[in-house]
Image: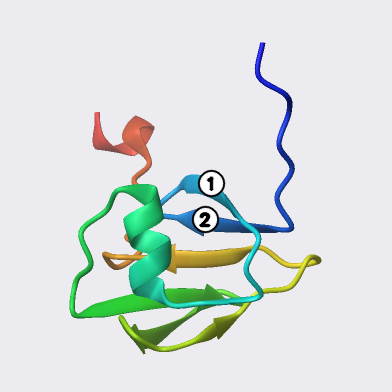
Amino acid sequence: MKPHREFRHIVDVDGMLIGVDAITATPATLLARAGIATPSTVMMVVDDREIALAADDAITLTETRVVFLRTSPIRASVDLRRAA
């Protein structure tokens, strides 16, 4: 059995959680780690607001906050009960 590995930082990339040890990273490196092709613009979600980032912008990671990156806009949820 492999030993358990702990990472210093957690990043949510399109709903997939990845662990990172580096203090700074770029959206391109984080998306590559998640196995997602890098679009020209990546959105970082902060306090329910989307901030556009270039693929090579530096992001400072902290141990107390999860970074949320999106490669497509957040869409409003659909209430399926009303759609029926």
Q: Quadrant of the C terminus?
A: top left
Q: Residues within 10 Å of mark 1 (few under 14, many from 20)?
A: some
Task: State the residue in front, 7 or 46.
Answer: 7
Q: Are marks 1 and 2 in contact (CB under 8 Å)?
A: yes
Rendered image: mark on residue 39: none
Q: Is residue 8 above or below residue 18?
A: below
Task: Kindly identify the residue that appears in the image at 29 percent across and 68 percent down.
Answer: 73
Percent from the top left, x then y, of residue 79? 38, 41
Q: Is residue 60 left or right of residue 55?
A: right
The residue singled out by tag 2 in the image is: 12
Secondary structure beneath dot 1 equals strand
Residue most extreme to the top: 1
Among the 4 quarters of the image, the one containing residue 8:
bottom right
The residue singled out by tag 1 in the image is: 17
Residue most extreme to the front: 2
Mark 1 or 2, nearer chain start: 2
Q: Quadrant of the N terminus?
A: top right
Secondary structure beneath dot 2 equals strand
